[in-house]
Image: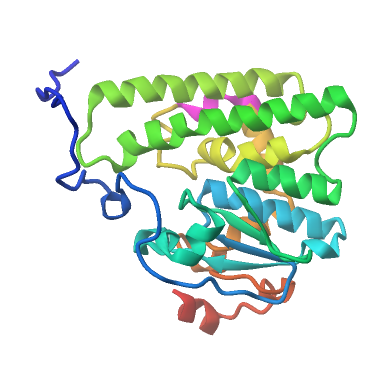
Amino acid sequence: MSDPSQYTPPKVWTWNKANGGRFANINRPVAGATHERALARGRHPLQLYSLATPNGVKVTVMLEELLALGHAGAEYDAWLIRIGDGDQFGSGFVDVNPNSKIPALLDCSGPAPLRVFESGAILLYLAEKFGAFLPADPARRAECLSWLFWQMGSAPYLGGGFGHFYAYAPTKIEYAIDRFAMEAKRQMDVLDRRLAESRYMAGDEYTIADIAIWPWYGGLALGQLYDAAEFLQVADYKHVLRWANEIAERPAVKRGRMVNRTFGPLEQQLHERHDASDFATRTEDKLQAQA
């Protein structure tokens, strides 16, 4: 292993310089709003404020799956939050999510808007609200929720750990990449062993556990995250690949992955979604206009 740069931490850490990297302009050690900005409201019961990162994709997939089942109350407006521009620090967004992270949801179907933040909490809230994608049987429900919370606890090692140091950090640090690559592969092995014995994460039934895990680990398996498929040898995880490909072919997943997407091929982008017809009425002119 190469020698790391010598660094001795100070007795008291102070924020006196940008930390570099792709997201340096939005990183800061304090919370709260930086500017006044009200959130837009559409006409549907559910108002989503998001971006098509893996955490954002979880919720748009869930909403599209609910609509595919015929739950009209799951109609939603999806508003684009450009995190690179600091939209998440606007006062309206902070009111919905004091942690200033996407996604954030307002449920306006009741007498007063109800906020829900953290992607796992949103999935669980919607599953309980509509009675879908969450098993009723206690044993299967426990399995589903265990894998849901596994994802919430594990993904920071994949995203903020491996993804950051492998893809985004301004300096490639061998120790950090090795440490988090090892953990990413261990997590993929956990999933592969589970999916060797089960069609989906919680059993034979597609649930919010799959919806939560797929955008992160399915995306990694399918070569959609960090350009790291070869580096991590994802082809070795055959059961994860089988599962990832099966879910990727679901029509609701294809739609959900497009919503609030501002990167990749234009035909895979739908910056905002305010009606189901938005998917069908996308023309080349509209695609160019939103680019």
Percent across and percent down for residue 266 are 50, 68
The relative height of residue 52 versus residue 54 in the rendered view (above or below) is below
Foreground residue among 89 and 205: 89
Residue 238 counted in the magenta span? yes
Percent across and percent down for residue 36 are 41, 70
Query: Which residue sits at x=65%, y=57%?
Result: 256
Percent across and percent down for residue 107 are 71, 61
- Answer yes or no: is residue 229 visible: no
User: Which quadrant of the structure image shows residue 153?
Assistant: top right
Percent across and percent down for residue 19 are 21, 43
Residue that lies at the very extreme toward the front in this rendered image: 111
Is residue 119 rendered to the left or right of residue 183?
Answer: right
Foreground residue among 235 and 216: 216
Query: Which residue sits at x=72%, y=42%?
Result: 124
The relative height of residue 122 versus residue 160 in the rendered view (above or below) is below
Magenta range: 233-239
Residue 188 counted in the magenta span? no
Foreground residue among 68 and 15: 15
Quarter holding the C terminus?
bottom left
The relative height of residue 151 versus residue 190 in the rendered view (above or below) is below
